[in-house]
Amino acid sequence: MNCSIFAKKAALQIVLIGYMGSGKSVVGKALADRLELPFLDLDDHIEEELGMSIPDIFRKKGEIFFRKKEHEYLKEILLSKDKVVLSTGGGTPCYSGNTDLLLDKTPNVFYLQLSVASLTARLADEKDHRPMISHLKPEELQEYIGKHLFERRPYYSRANHTISCEGKSVDEIAAEIAAKLV
Ligand SMILES: Nc1ncnc2c1ncn2[C@@H]1O[C@H](COP(=O)(O)OP(=O)(O)O)[C@@H](O)[C@H]1O
Ligand SMILES: O=C(O)C1=C[C@@H](OP(=O)(O)O)[C@@H](O)[C@H](O)C1
Ligand SMILES: [Mg+2]
C-alpha cells in the first residue's frame, strides 16, 4: 500500500511574540526565508485587509476596533495556514484570549526578549508608526516601556520558548529558533 497518498503533511506554525521593537517582524522574515516557509506579519495583514495603515486604524477606528480585527485575523490565519511563520504585534498575546489560541494550536510560540534599555534605544527612532508610543516625548519612552513591559510580561512568558535577543544578530536569532522547532 502506498501510504504517502494518506500521509497528512505535518503542520508547522511558528509564532513570534514580544514587545514592540523586539524584532518580531525582521526575525520572522529571516526565519521564513531560512526555512523556506511562507511568512505573514499580522500587522501587515491587517493593513492589507482593511486598506488602512496601523496609525490610521487607531486614529480613525480606535484601539478596540484594532484589537477585534487583530483577534479575528489571528484566528483566521491559524485555522487556514498549516505552514507559516507568523510575526504578531506587540499587544497580540495580551488581548481576547489570543495566547490560549496560539498555545492550543502550536508548540512553536517564541518570545523574543530584549531589555528595556535596548527596546528604548530601538524605538526612539521608530515610534512614529507605533500608535501606542507615538505620543510620548523621547524622555518619557524608557519609563513607559518599563511599566508596559511589566504589565505584558505575564503574557509573553507563557510562550513555549524565550529567546534572549540581547546583542544577537537577526540571523543568529533565526538560527536559534530554527534549532528549537518541534
Ligand atoms: N537582532 C537585531 N539586531 C539589530 N537590529 C534589530 C534586530 N532585530 C530587529 N532590529 C531592528 O529593530 C527595529 C524593530 O524591529 P521589528 O522587527 O520591526 O520589531 P517588532 O516587529 O518586534 O516591533 C527595526 O529597525 C529592526 O531592523
Ligand atoms: O504593542 C502593541 O500594542 C502594538 C504593536 C505593534 O506591532 P509591533 O510590535 O510589530 O510594533 C502594532 O501591532 C500596533 O501598533 C500595536
Ligand atoms: Mg512588527
Image (tube, helix red, strand yellow):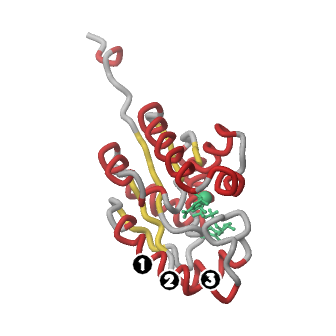
Q: Which image quadrant for residue 58?
A: bottom right
Say if 31 sits above or below 144 in the image: above
Residue that label 3 marks:
141
Q: Which mark is residue 158?
A: none
Please tell me which residue is depicted at 34% across the width and 25% down the height of the picture.
8
Residue that label 2 marks:
146
Q: Which image quadrant for residue 111?
A: bottom left
Residue that label 1 marks:
150
- Counting from the top left corner in percent of width and height, residue 169 is at 60, 70
Please tell me which residue is depicted at 54% across the width and 79% down the height of the picture.
145
Q: Amino acid at mark 2?
A: Gly
Q: Quadrant of the N terminus?
A: top left
- Counting from the top left corner in percent of width and height, residue 122 is at 65, 76
Say if 84 sits above or below 163 in the image: above
- Counting from the top left corner in percent of width and height, residue 135 is at 69, 74
Say if 144 sits above or below 53 in the image: below
Please tell me which residue is depicted at 52% across the width and 47% down the height of the picture.
70
